[in-house]
Image (tube, grey):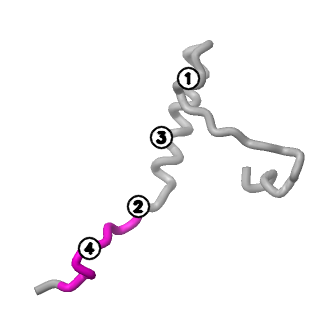
Amino acid sequence: MKVLKKIDDIGFCQLTSKDVVRHPLVQQIVQAYDAYEKKQKPERPTRRRNGGNER
């Protein structure tokens, strides 16, 4: 997707396992990509509500 996203005539849609119901193998492929993408995203540190002041 990184390579093709700058081409105007190409579009992408994000599917989940709920969108694919025809073949179990396709569902497994989508689930594998979902799990992979979750592992690739860096987690954001949580912000403290009190502005980070520790006493």
Of the residues under marks 3 and 2, which one precedes in the sequence? Answer: 3
State left or right for residue 41 relative to residue 53.
right
Dot 2: few (<14), some (14–19), or many (≥20) neighbours within 10 Å? few
Identified by mark 1, the residue type is Gln
Residue 23 x %, y %: 60, 14
Secondary element under disc 1, as helix, strand or loop, is helix
Which one is in front in this view, the residue at disc 3 or the one at disc 2?
Answer: 2
Confirm or deny contact between disc 2 and disc 4 (CB under 8 A).
no
| Label whose residue precedes the other's in the sequence (3 or 1) | 1
Number of numbered discs on residues: 4
Q: How far is mark 3 from mark 1, CA to CA? A: 12 Å
Q: Which residue is under mark 1?
A: 27
As shown in the figure, which amino acid type bears the numbered disc 4? Arg
Q: Earlier in the sequence, mark 1 or mark 4?
A: 1
Q: Nearer the viewer, mark 2 or mark 4?
A: 4
Give the Cα separation between the discs numbered 4 and 3. Answer: 29 Å
- The residue indicated by pointer 4 is 48
Residue range highlighted in magenta: 44-53
Relative side of 55 to 20, left or right: left
Q: Residue at x 62, y 13 (%)?
A: 22
Q: Position of residue 43 (x, y in %)?
A: 41, 61
State the mark number for residue 35.
3
Label 2, on which residue? 43
Label 2 – label 1 distance at C-alpha = 26 Å
Figure check: 16 above or below 41: above
Q: Mark 4 and mark 1 in contact (Cβ < 8 Å)?
A: no
Q: Residue at x 10, y 86 (%)?
A: 55
Q: Nearer the viewer, mark 1 or mark 4?
A: 4
Residue 45 screen position, x and y as percent: 35, 68
